[in-house]
Amino acid sequence: MQTNFTLRQLQDPDLREADKILRACVHCGFCLATCPTYGVLGDELDSPRGRIYLIKDMLENDKPASPRVAEHIDRCLSCLGCMTTCPSGVDYMHLVDYARVRIEETHLRPWPVRLLRAALAYVLPNPAAFRMAVTLARLARPFADLLPRGLRAIMEFAPAKLPPPSPENRPRIFEAQGRRRMRVALLQGCVQTVLAPEINAATVRLLIRHGVEVIASAGAGCCGALVHHLGRRNDARESARKNVAAWTNLLDRGGLDAVVINAAGCGTMVKDYGFLLRDDPEFAAQAARISGLARDVTEILRDLGLASAKAPRRLAVAYHAACSLQHGQGVHDLGRELLGASGFETREIPDGHLCCGSAGTYNLLQPDLAQELGRRKAAMIERIRPDVVAAGNIGCMVQIARNMARPVVHTAELLDWATGGPCPPAILAAEKQPRH
């Protein structure tokens, strides 16, 4: 793609990077076939190629984002399926991330939207505030029909009951069982610690059983992905700096073999810290080092090798590869391979490369589109009739579970069960339901 940035514009490192990305695009249109929003809406401006044209026009002409540009960029899931299918290697992720920043800086959204986005940016990364918000949402559910569509979406996602906080989500060291093979830091997360603390508990049990010392470090918190995709780059950088500082402290005081992440969206973000903080004189080198250590939990288990894994039951498992894992990190079938090696019967989901519609805050900000994508994903899963659905990302788990009755669990929960841990709570709860 030909670009026409001025020499003055190219002095800006963000525009220089955008120029390089834009020039890689050859207009081939391969991305249209793998874009979920284009598949639903049929509008090329809701495809990666169309959005690239809008971004190019906005940046080259150095003009504020128009409502039209904001609308089509807001509809992008950042699922990154386009990057997997692109033959030219267009770095769409960083281009659309920067477009979101420009929109946030130059476009004045309607005040109810601004209020909702600001509330999400404050509440979701803060476990205490999120727990309180979920409690309030449950109390307000009887009045949901009186609320705007965006607030109704929040009510719909509030679970009927919240699990109590888990000790795995407090700073501490979990000693390895037997000979220590690795020493890792575990990103505890934010939303996940409130909605599904059993995921971190299963991850810790699974890792220490394989000779891994696990550190839940003080000072580390939200990865920054939620605010980053809202265009709030400064907030995202601040979260990244806190995590980098906490994990660098561990590196300097005994070393680390990896930073382990069990939420795929967070993993994509942490693996990109080196880029996010590339111009930060204090943190650039440390951030690049941390990004190089970031691993999804399935990557760690692949490297260590599963020990004495045997599925307690021959369950049929539909493995959902989260977009942020398969497209964002290039980790495609690893979870399914590990589950199969553990004795579960794994079944491939048709069109498994397509997004479920969760995408961080997307299902709250674009509830109608997200719901349509969720229904489509559930229908694809139902076609293979699994006993249980496994995924490696809390957002996907919540989105899929609200669209179907089958139990949805984290991959680490099943692997923990297969190597001596307890049965996942979602499976136990499903077994208690009356059969029809």
Image (tube, helix red, strand yellow):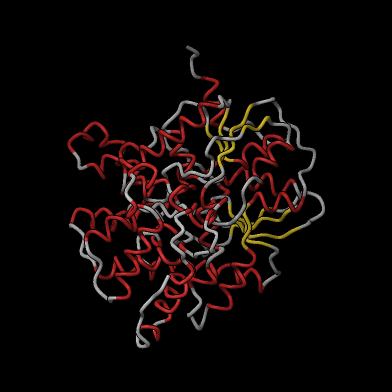
Q: 160 or 396: nearer the eye?
A: 396
Quadrant the N terminus occupies: bottom left
Write down the quadrant of residue 161 in the picture.
top left
What is the quadrant of residue 315 in the picture?
A: top right
Question: On the rendered structure, is 302 left or right of 432?
Answer: right
Q: Residue at x 77, y 48 (%)?
A: 305
The residue at the far top in this view is 436
Residue 332, horizontal then vertical, whole percent: 61, 48
Q: Position of residue 149 (x, y in %)?
A: 23, 41
Find residue 230 and report its horizontal and vertical position in percent.
Answer: 35, 60
Q: Nearer the viewer, residue 249 or 343?
A: 343
For the point 69% across and 25% down, the residue is 313
- In this image, 380 relative to 4: left or right? right
Q: Is residue 200 left or right of residue 195?
A: right
Position of 274 relative to 220 (above/below): below
The count of marks equals: 0
Picture residue at 71% right of the left edge, 53% below the top: 175
> Of 82 and 424, which appears nearest the observer?
82
Position in image of residue 410 (x %, y %): 57, 40
Q: Residue furthest right?
A: 179
